[in-house]
Image (spheres, helix red, strand yellow):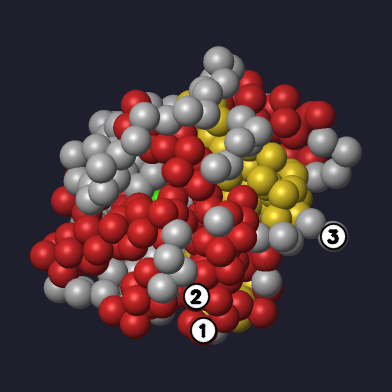
Amino acid sequence: MTTPIILDCDPGHDDVFAIWLAAGDPAIELRAITTVGGNGRLEHTTLNARIACTVAGIEGVPIAAGAAGPLAGELHPADWIHGDNALGGPVLPEPTVPLDERDAITFMRDVIEASAEPITIVATGPLTNVAVLLRDHAELAPRIARIVWMGGSTTRGNVTPYAEFNAWTDPEAIKIALDSGVDFTMVGLNISHQALITREVRDRLSAIGTPLSAFGVELLEFFCSTYERAERMPDGPLHDPITVALLADPAVATTVRTRIDVELDGTETRGATSTDLIDILGREHNATVALDLDVDRFWGLIERSLRALG
Ligand code: BDR
Ligand code: CA
């Protein structure tokens, strides 16, 4: 049994590892990749998705570009973490994999309609594309098995004290996804900050000894250096692949059903994901939240995917 997914992403260093895990893990069937403006402007995130596939020899997974910016307001790319091209560090090759000419929403619709079984959407950037799909094609909701999203937090933020970057970029999109009735899982900073890219992890991936692992470690070195500068974290957190890992091997993390609401209007808290882990509000549960990561198991999946891609 494999899980068919569409991976909606904004590569971004950690998004690249999510793509590689989705393509390299035997439990996942990566049907399509869609891109969104987030870590970088759409032209960069789209180019980077194609580069991620090119360096890993991932062919035959169609890629389509989606929303350039959030539903409301301007995009503010995370260049302080990911660099000007959203993929700072290694010299980037010219991509050899093509870009589908459809826009991401049409393309997602086509993939979902063509599938015999419901599709899981894994989102590792702002939820803009997912929200537009659910808003404009509500009839597709029953054909979406679930949405597994990296973003938000049960605790702290990373752009403001309470808002995580993907959530802060497009809070309105989160509300649309939560209100859609599609099964929703949040993989927030509370768990992703357990996936620390320690020196030991970088050495372990380096020891694979392939051009792909060398490229990956160059990405991680850059990412850790910007995390050290921006957040005083010398071992940066590999947020995004936890979404895919959770599907590939549910034992990689504990989860709980709970209530999430997103702050749209707060003067200091716009984009905060209010997660009622103690049921203090008594509201109906509307989401699953990932809590504790089995760190060894997680890095084992990452290593295995890099080895599988060769
Ligand atoms: C999220 O924001 C981006 O910088 C990462 O790719 C991840 O999706 C973490 O806040
Ligand atoms: Ca991302």
- Element class at badge 1: helix
* Amino acid tagged 1: Asp
The residue depicted at 52 percent of the width and 23 percent of the height is 99
Residue 219 visible to an observer of this rendering: yes
* Amino acid tagged 3: Met
The residue depicted at 41 percent of the width and 73 percent of the height is 207
| Label 2 to label 1: alpha-carbon separation | 5 Å
How packed mark 3 is, by other alpha carbons closer than 10 Å (few <14, some 14-19, many 20 or more), is few
* 56 relative to 190, above or below: above
Q: In the image shown, does 120 or 306 lie closer to the viewer?
A: 306
How packed mark 1 is, by other alpha carbons closer than 10 Å (few <14, some 14-19, many 20 or more), is few
Report the residue marked by disc 3: 1
Residue 92 quadrant:
top left
Does the beta carbon of the residue at mark 1 sit less than 8 Å from ligand 1? no
* 172 relative to 271, above or below: above
Which disc number belongs to residue 296? 1
Residue 46 horizontal side relative to residue 44, left or right: right
